[in-house]
Amino acid sequence: MSESTSARYARVVTDLALDREFDYRIPPELKERVREGSLVRVPFGPRELRGWVTGLTDRAEVDPGKIRDLLEVEGDRPFLLPVVRRLARWMARYYCAPIETAFRTVLPGAVRREGARPRQQLTASIVENAAGEDGETITAKQERVLDILRESGPLTLTELTRRAGTSQAPVRSLAKKGRIELKYADLRRDPLARRPVLRVDPPELMPQQRDALERIREASDSGQPRVLLLHGVTGSGKTEVYLQAIRHVIDHGRSAIVLVPEIALTPQTVDRFRSRFGDRVAVLHSHLSDGERFDEWGRIRDGKADIVVGARSAVFAPLEKPGLIVVDEEHESSYKQEEAPRYHARDVAVVRGRMESCPVVLGSATPSLESLSNVRKGKYELLGMPSRVDDRTMPRIRVVDMRVEAEREGKPVVFSRLLIEEIRARLERAEQTILFLNRRGFSSSLICPQCGHVAQCDRCSVSMTYHKKDRRLKCHLCGAEVRVPERCPNADCRSPEFKYAGMGTERIEEILGRLLKGARIRRVDSDTMRGKESYDEVLGDFRTGKLDLLVGTQMLAKGLDFPNVTLVGVINADISLHMPDFRAGERTFQLLTQVAGRAGRGEVEGEVVVQTFTPYETSIQAARRMAWEEYCDQELEFRRELSYPPHSHLVCIHFEGPGEATVHEAADRFAQELVRRLPETVILSGPAPAPLARIKGQYRYHLLLRAEKTASMTRPLKELMSDYRFPRGISCRVDVDAQSLL
Ligand code: ADP
Ligand code: ZN
Ligand code: ZN
């Protein structure tokens, strides 16, 4: 640490939920060590708290006589880069979130936590040029120890003795002779240690890839914060373009961040980056242990890794001089965090790019309407990659009208004749199939055939899902479970015949087992895939041909690349279409397109069969014809008429409480206060019961605000909330740019 600060006060955010910063005096002995971004200890009332320094100043906001001293500075370097601090502030303001939640978000708990430190182990290394003294004898065992160290570099004592097959004694005596050195060193907890990868040279790019790469390089060299939307169909080689763009960027001494949706952050994805860049790649995602996360974060901060591949929060990686930020699958709603600050990682990436004069590439086969609309406004540039690598054809998509099937069979059916025939054909040719249904459980709900009673969760306004294996009804919202009742719960009915309605992956698996004797079928959803290992294992078995068919939920829709899959079936396209949400059509289009992209990634052409009760629905037809822009044009028109995003920004305010009337009343009163402060340009709807009107016994209302500028809504909102008192038991949360209205 060199220069000391001349400022007198430090502004500090603590972990307390107060949405405020506090000033502390910097005592002379800490002047050398305190920096903006330092992690510090401060007195707070009778207590001691930890916090971050958000700023240094000579002017305190309170009476200098009352200011107390900083107690301690932790660590020898600031934990937060200036740009990350700015991002935290921006988030708190834009997403209308308490400042402490923003600071907590930008620094992982594993790094922030008290006592988080590197793991140290006794490590042995060769002392160079330490020629043995005359007459010194080296035993055979000691010679072996030296050979191993020469060959493999420094090793921990444990590892060294294991490899040499000796006790510690020969190692210790070599150390005494000065031939090797034994000392405590940081031991890297490497999440990828057990996955060796081979270095792979980049392939020759296709013309469309070369053009896209050229534009990205040029943007990177320009040093301007440009945003490029890369619309490339599935299998068009987007990832290869990212890889080569990153090569260009790091060759110019800058670094890169790649965001991938958590669900697509499979070891295979990470391997592709590591096989090109080796140890320069750090990964950040939710399956790391605290130790691994601490070490990966440290490698980034210390400049040992200059390429970060990670999920949502990797956008805050402590990486200096980024020359490129990539957001893959930019349309994914999982980039939105569901707790405060409810940030959208894609949008934060664009803001970081602007702060660092660094280009941002948003890639997708089905870009969001928000991003397309930014292209049309001239804010983003569009790059297109319309064909697949090697001009492999796009899969043919056939839509099956399930009403016609039901008529022909005289009853509703789960599988159309076409889909079953196509699956059988695959089995005969030893090709593979993926079947897709975005709902788990055996059947969606239990309906009484006598009275129509549906088993509902007591605490949530949704029906319970039937899970056959354990004969239980489960609520997918709150997790409540009950045994399947013997009789209809309706007291006036009590019929013993409960009928299975709808369907889930478990039932599909069972029916398939019956229809396709001998086929090797596995189900992939969050019920069967509890650990990451089981998921990797199933995918491994599928890749090596030990399985014929996978049935699964969205887990299967993203980024998987299996050359032998020539058929994809969508069992019921209507499920996502009937969500009570204005984005339902867009989501259905994206889902079908992504799912179709899993077919025909090898030599053989792929086919897709989509089963639906609404075959003429716009999003289904557009997905069938792969007409992205045409679909967007129609959908944008619809959104314009209703002033929904991207024609406006949407702020959703949720109210929750134990009694319906009190929640309704509290929401009404808040809305009245708010209206008085909002400019006229803001459209206000509600308060109204939320589409999921009750969760875990809590009643829910929401209030929607729409306007062109977010600040015109959030500024008055924050002002009102700063001193607003809700009645007891009522909670309120604000979701800026809400992705879902549920
Ligand atoms: P996307 O990310 O658009 O789905 P990928 O980058 O994963 O596409 O490419 C699809 C497949 O084609 C991958 O197996 C990849 O290794 C391969 N590939 C990509 N670009 C090329 C190329 N120029 N030449 C040969 N193979 C390529
Ligand atoms: Zn009944
Ligand atoms: Zn429930």
Image: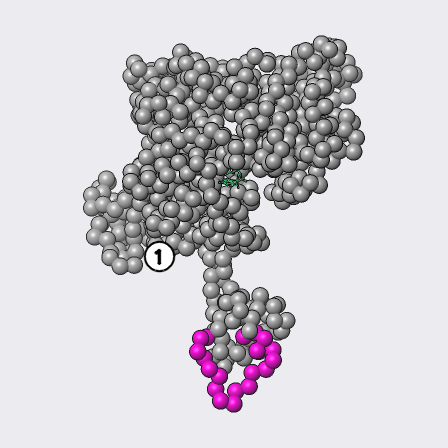
Identify the residue at image location x=49%, y=81%. Answer: 177
Colour treatment of the image: one colour
Q: Where is residue 546 in the image (x, y as percent from the top left)?
A: 71, 41
**Along the line of sight, the residue nearer the viewer: 690 or 494:** 690
What is the three-letter code of the residue carrying label 1? Asp
Determine whether 638 is above or below 76 in the image: above
Q: Can residue 137 be seen in this view?
A: yes
Q: Is residue 317 visible?
A: no
> Magenta segment range?
127-146
Instruction: Please identify the quarter of the rendering in which residue 674 is found.
Output: top left
Identify the residue at image location x=41%, y=55%. Answer: 304
Label 1: few (<14), some or many (≥20) within 10 Å?
A: few
Residue pushed farthest bottom? 135
Q: Is the magenta stretch mostly helix, strand or loop?
A: loop
**Along the line of sight, the residue nearer the viewer: 667 or 123:** 123
Task: Say if the magenta span includes residue 579.
Answer: no
Q: Where is residue 136 in the image (x, y as percent from the top left)?
A: 52, 87
Left or right: 10 as drawn, with respect to 613: left
Q: Where is residue 640 in the image (x, y as percent from the top left)?
A: 39, 14
Left or right: 215 as drawn, with respect to 166: left
Identify the residue at image location x=59%, y=24%. Answer: 396
Q: What element carries label 1?
A: loop
Determine whether 276 is above or below 722 in the image: below
Identify the residue at image location x=47%, y=43%. Answer: 204
